[in-house]
Image (spheres, rainbow, N blue to C red):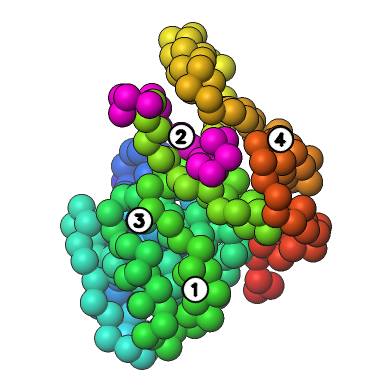
Amino acid sequence: MLDGPRFDRIHRGRGVWAVSGEPRDLRFLLRADRLVMPADAVVSHVTGLQLHGVELGHATRHWSTNSTTRRSLAGIALHRRQAPLRPVVLDGIPVLPAHRCLVDAAITLSHRDIVRIADALVAAGLTTPEHFAAYAWGRHLHGVRRSRMNAGRVRERVWSFRETDLRLLLAVAGLPEAEVNLDLLDDTGAHLACGDLVLRPWRIVLEYDGWYHERSAAQRHKDILRREALEAAGWLVIVLVSSDLERPASLIGRVWRSMVSRGYTGPPPRFAPWQLEELTRSPKG
């Protein structure tokens, strides 16, 4: 009966089957993995980050163990660790804490992705910039070097990967750092808006306009009224879309020229293509 069409093998040769047509989300697969993993195995690395709510889309599922047991299973990486593993439990699945998962995964992530994920974990209340930095500097794990290199770039109140990308582009160019998701008030103290990235000394707001705004007429109308209110209060609103991020030199030029028009006297941007390549390059292996 198990060899018939009503059931599918999950781990071939390991005695694990599932009813055909059963939804195969990440939690389903991890529960199936537990049936063939060492007893102390816990979810880790990028898989742990996904379980903590960070959408990454990695196919390989990562587990860690203190045992010397070896497993060779399709689609699974089992890491043998010397230091004791101290997991938390999410939906009945043991997983390492979010900051530990990121430090472990950092050895294979680009600098940009490390900051993206750390920003997302901070926004979700799973760590703080200070705690992530302290953990990276206080441990001797494989990913601590790259984690330490980027710990100072992590910020609070970052709600999307695109906001992280914009902030890092300005930093690479040597321009002043923008404040993230800042509440903007008018002269009477009334709330005008929450700006995505704000260059407060020059009263400039950088707004990322995602695809969902174009698909919602109500959201689009709300954004127009919001931007009119900001401009009436003396703010310059620069609207950026996904294609702008594909032309970073042009984007940085737009921001710098706007800052100059508002009285910025600092040095011009020093953007170099190799700096962006290093920011987005993932380590080999």
- From this view, report whether residue 284 is shown above or below residue 205: below
Q: Position of residue 215 (x, y in %)?
A: 53, 15
| The C terminus - image quarter | bottom right
Q: Which residue is mark 1?
A: 147
Q: Nearer the viewer, mark 2 or mark 1?
A: 2
Is 178 on the left-hand or right-hand side of 10?
A: right
Mark 1 Cα-neighbour bin, 10 Å: few <14, some 14–19, many ≥20? many
Q: Residue at x 71, y 65 (%)?
A: 278
Q: Which residue is mark 4?
A: 261
Q: Nearer the viewer, mark 2 or mark 4?
A: 4
Tell me how far mark 4 sits from mark 3, CA to CA: 34 Å
Mark 4 Cα-neighbour bin, 10 Å: few <14, some 14–19, many ≥20? few
Q: Which residue is mark 2?
A: 195
**Mark found first going from the N terminus, 2 or 1:** 1
**Mark found first going from the N terminus, 1 or 3:** 3
Q: Residue at x 37, y 30 (%)?
A: 185
**Mark found first going from the N terminus, 1 or 4:** 1
Is 256 on the left-hand or right-hand side of 147?
A: right
Q: Are marks 1 and 4 in contact (CB under 8 Å)?
A: no
Q: Which residue is mark 3?
A: 122
Tell me how far mark 2 sits from mark 1, CA to CA: 28 Å
Q: Residue at x 48, y 37 (%)?
A: 196
**Mark found first going from the N terminus, 2 or 3:** 3
Q: Amino acid at mark 2?
A: Gly
Q: Amino acid at mark 4?
A: Ser
- The residue range painted magenta reads 187-204
